[in-house]
Amino acid sequence: MLSNLRTSWLSTRTVPHRRTYPGKQVLQRKFGIRAEINFVNVEEAKKLTADDGYVIVDVRDKSQFDRAHIKSCYHVPLFIQNEDNDLGTIIKRTVHNNFSGLFFGLPFTKPNPEFVQSVKAQFSPQTKLLLVCQEGLRSAAAADKLEKAGFENIACITSGLQSVKPGTFESVGSGELQDAGKAGLVQIQGKISAVLGTVLICAYLFITLFPDQAEKLLQMVPSS
């Protein structure tokens, strides 16, 4: 049995009561349990796709999807590139690109108005869907939209693809699934820090293991 977290929602709708009174219409509420959304870990998600027939739908934006995605998944972004040209959007896009875009490589997006319809065009409400994103937030929001639209079998990876270890899923792209959300100057800085750290460690080991050779090398450095 999967040790997952399930959420269900109690929905209500108001309908006219069959009994009527002069000059009055009596309303009653009907209660029903809406479909469950399963929040699973990576191992459970793997089992859902391998054994239970779940179809993977990637709801990330195109930039993260292109960096790395699960092979044979479907891509239906919850957010799309915002290329509107009204003054307010232009200002927001400029501010975004000079900060979040530059440092974190995040695109300037807006909600995809065709998200639910795009999913409906490809899958029936009975299709078992595993929704994935990078951190788990967008897939949860997407699951809520699809659940309200009538989809009955939805699962999400709780912490997103950032928690997927290399080799868990067969992937396509230039990087690993867990790193697909990293871009911009932060990623470059991280690479520089890793290189410098490696150099310093090697230098320390060289000085420790070969002190005589290290001293000769230091004597060869011109003094300022």
Image (cartoon, grey):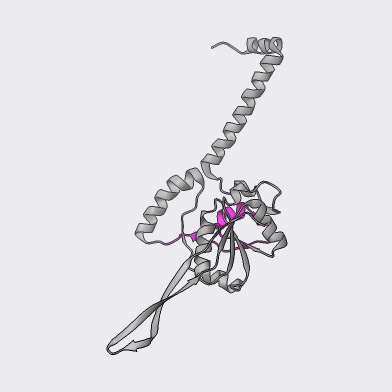
Q: Is residue 61 rendered magenta in the image?
A: yes
Left or right side of 41 for 212? right
> Which part of the image, by quadrant, shows the N terminus?
bottom right
Q: Is residue 124 placed above or below 21 in the rendered structure?
A: above
Q: Is residue 157 visible?
A: yes
| Extreme residue in the left direction | 23
Residue at 40% over, 49% down: 95
Q: Is residue 161 rendered magenta in the image?
A: no
Residue at 56% over, 72% down: 120
- Residue 52 x, y percent position in the rendering: 69, 63
Residue at 34% over, 88% down: 20
Q: Is residue 73 placed above or below 207 in the rendered structure?
A: below
**In terms of depth relative to the viewer, which is nearer, 1 or 154?**
1
What residue range appears in magenta? Answer: 59-84
Q: Is residue 131 placed above or below 134 in the rendered structure?
A: below
Left or right side of 113 for 203? right
- Residue 115 x, y percent position in the rendering: 52, 67
Q: Is residue 165 placed above or below 6 in the rendered structure?
A: above
All told, the count of numbered labels is: 0
| Extreme residue in the bottom direction | 22
**In terms of depth relative to the viewer, which is nearer, 74 or 81?**
74
Q: Is residue 115 visible?
A: no
- Residue 43 x, y percent position in the rendering: 67, 52
- Residue 80 x, y percent position in the rendering: 50, 61
Residue 182, image quadrant:
top right
